[in-house]
Image (cartoon, rainbow, N blue to C red):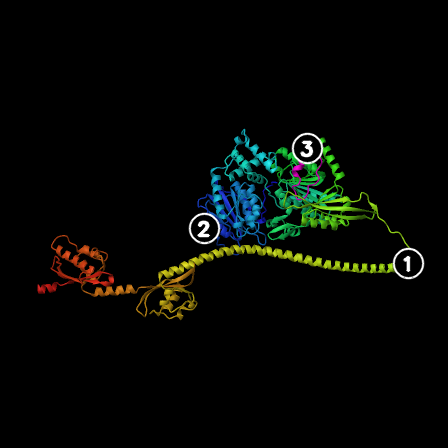
Amino acid sequence: MVGEHDISLTASAITTEASLKKKSKPKLASNSYVVAVGASAGGLEALERFFDELPVNSGAIFVVVQHLSPDHKSMMDNLLARHTAMPVIMAENGMEMKENHVFLIPPGKNMTVAGNQLRLIPKPPHVLSLPIDLFFSSISKEFGNRAVGVILSGTGSDGTRGAVAINDAGGFLLAQDPETAKFDGMPRSVIATGLVDEIMPPEMLASRIVGHVKNTVEHTAKVSEREIQDESNPLEAILHLLYQVGGINFKEYKQATVLRRIERRMQIRHVRDLSNYLRLLESERSEIIALKRDSLIPVTSFFRDSETFETLHKTAIQTILEEHHEAQPIRVWVAGTATGEEAYTMAILFAEAFDRIKRWPQIKIFATDVEQQYVDFASAGVYSESIANEMSPERLERYFTKRGNQFVVKNEIRQTVIFARHNILEDPPFTRMNMVSCRNVLIYFDTPAQEKALLRFQYALSHSGYLLLGSSESLGVLHKDFTVTNAKHKIYRVLRPVSLPLDFKSGASKAEGHARVSRLARPRIFNSESSIIESGHAMLMKSYTPPALLINDERELVHVYGDAQRYMQIPAGSASLDVSKLLVGKLAPVGVALLHKVAKEKIELRSDIQLIEPSKGLSEHVRVAVRPVVSESENDHYFLMTFELQQPSAQPITHSKEIDLSEVTGERIQSLERDLSSTRDSLQATIEELETSNEELQATNEELMASNEELQSTNEELQSVNEELYTVNSENQEKIEILNRLNTDLDNMTRAALIPTVFIDATLKLTRFTPEASTIFRIRDSDIGRTISDFAHEMEYPEFISDLKRVIQTAQVMEREVKTWDDRWFVVRALPYIDHPMSINGAVLTFFEITLLKDAQRLQAILDSLPEHIAVLDTKGIILLVNRAWRDFSERNGERGLVHTGPGNNYLSVCQIEDGPDAEYSNNVQQGICDVMGGKIKDFSMTYPCHSPTEKRWFLMHVTPVEYLGGGVVVSHVNITPWMKNHG
């Protein structure tokens, strides 16, 4: 049955959250969704696939909760940032959550939320930490139906209880398909609850969440009062479908509670109104099952509200033991047990009470629930590792066995609890109960149903029996029939017995056959006609049906038919339902053998046995038959063992008459008797030796069990560490791949640059170099690690080593031009190697060759030393280079900055003159230059006048080709004025 929402927190977490509640909490926008993603081992790959498909503007807040090692720095923020355009931020205490952002839990912390702020809690040492459960529980309280929980790859079961809390709050639950997970423990654990809304690969989960958030924001599913009052009455039809398929009458539940669960399913299925949802239910039986499942949330835990159980032990349980009569078993009914935690808690409390008083009376705890799936789960007695936070380590070790990532209830506790499917409101109540516990169930019923259930509990209680209710529940109109034992913890004691009305509906047929163990006999409350029919049926069963036992596949007695008392016994010692201990005489070994063979061969078998009752001097022949019983469940196997008398009347045992024996015969008898006595003595000695050996073996076994428990505990710690290391290793592996790619990029970049580069450490040892560096230093790959001064180099640079040391010491960049022995020139630049602010661990040397630049400078110097005006043109006539004489002449003629005749200008355009006396010269110059460029002539010369206002001048222009420039030319102008004046 449904119960109150509760997830166990560590003490520090509870204290911290309580203090935060006192502070004012800023509120998020009403449509803000928080998507909590839980992952553990193997989760990095799943997270990358998940975020690869998420858009940057989904409108949701994303929080990633992982199992991280507290001893290693997490690189998850850098790794995830490569797979999403959303900002990825490592959470800090008090940090505000923002939509379209990704927040990560830091190592060594647990995390909760308060309003829209993240709260970090130190992870307690040496305690099982379940950060996903804790965070899921926190957002379920703060965000309700706007909480979205996602479980990805991981071992163990962290996240399962938190997922139940999210579902209870109306949130949306998703899990990675176990077939796509590297480790499927966490996904399978949460899927086993039956509460997961979607099971998909990670990349599909992303689009499903985006669709859910968008649909919910734009169209919030809300059942209106008009729809409830509609003539077609869709709500009534939905409740009828639930009753038909699920067998539960939700009309007796509070309407608001049922509507909330219907609205949640409508939201998930993107249905806008109640009528359309009714049509969906009519077409999909699976949706009816999903709605029923959503309405019956198994939220419970061991020792929930520990103060209540402590008070229960001090009051009710102690009183029950004080007033208990040895002849009668103690009987307890835990109604609405859900997945069984509370029933086992009750069994543990009684076991501890028995140990204190050193008396162990027989006890039967009947644990019932309306949902068969939960009954089966509870009956198995297997729970996730999260229960370690719900009880003390001593209790966990005493009453549970560790099996992998799970805890199994030990047999001494399991045998005291009988689980069965039972509907409180329809099936007959149990009887003669010393205590009835029904916590946090009645709050979901309407008032008439609450009174109906309480009346059944009162009927079930024996005189002065105890009733335990939930913290929000009360006795209502029945308060006069009970005394208050403890008002705070809702513990009551019945004052007077009650009889139920004759028209009380039993509903027995609906409850039978659904539990693994048979249902107990229920009170016979019928009307007069049905009572006669039942009496006749009972008489026929007694008269014509042989005594029989119903036995399960663990050889435990489930039900007794007819008068089988003569074939059974109750041995002294601890109570057991094992038929091998209950059957008398030869029946025990024969019956066990038949059960074994029938279970193996699936056939009916019989065996005839002679039973002797020495006290009555009678013997009888009994035929024992065992046949398999067909069960609705494939997992449950039962057997029916019947007893049939083969002789109608018992025959007296025939005793031997006394006869006279000869002396020889007498001596022979005496000899045989002595041999028999000796054999008996020898057998007794052997038995005693075997008993001693058995005690030694038992002691050894106990030591081995203790060692095994220690090893299991160590294995659990190692498994937790291994999981954290796996996460760290995944991050490191991803980082290594990134570094490898960066290293490869760097290698390719330096090779493509063709620049000699050398890396040295702070001690001048070579750490890395490019292939081109071998043209300067005589180094090979095997020289890595040697001091740079060990290598010969081609540079005329005696200060090389001292300059390097100065760069490393002062962190100043150094740059020099140096020449090699083969007349090459380089710019040597030495930079400090900085791997952390203010941390210098060496230097980087680069060598940029400037030989061509030096050649150009040398050429320019040569040209500048000539008196002729010289310019170099390319194939299009663009001026590439001029000498000093050219520049000086241009400036003397009024052209400052070589605007028209300097490099970059087209000389052919400068020479072009359209008209005037110089037009003819201009055309000849252009034509001559073009002919030399085109290869028509080898060179071109021309004398031309270039008079100034103060004097007359003549120049000789000469144009020659330059093959190096690919068709360019050199133009020179020589002032021949003196010569012209002398020869004019």
Image position of 957 with respect to 321: above or below: below
Direction left: furthest residue: 984
Image location of residue 213, percent across then percent down: 48, 41
Left of 218 or right of it: where is 643?
A: right
- The answer to whether residue 867 is magenta is no
Q: Position of residue 202 (x, y in %)?
A: 50, 48
* Circle 3 residues within 10 Å: few <14, some 14–19, many ≥20: few
Which residue corresponds to mark 3?
504
Mark 1 Cα shell of 10 Å, populated few (<14), some (14-19), many (≥20):
few
Query: Would you name the residue on which mark 2 appears?
Result: 83
Q: Amino acid at mark 2?
A: His
Q: Mark 1 or mark 2, which is nearer the start of the sequence?
A: 2
Task: Kindly identify which residue carries mark 1.
Answer: 662
Quadrant assignment for the C terminus: bottom left
Element type at mark 3: loop
State the CA–CA distance, disc 3 to disc 2: 64 Å
Ranked by sequence position, the earlier of labels 1 and 3 is: 3
Label of residue 100 in the image: none
Q: Which residues are magenta?
A: 506-526
Which of the two marks, 1 or 3, is nearer to us in this view? Answer: 1
Please state the horizontal and vertical placement of residue 112, each as a whole percent of the image: 53, 47
Between 890 and 568, the residue placed more toward the observer is 568
Element carrying mark 2: loop
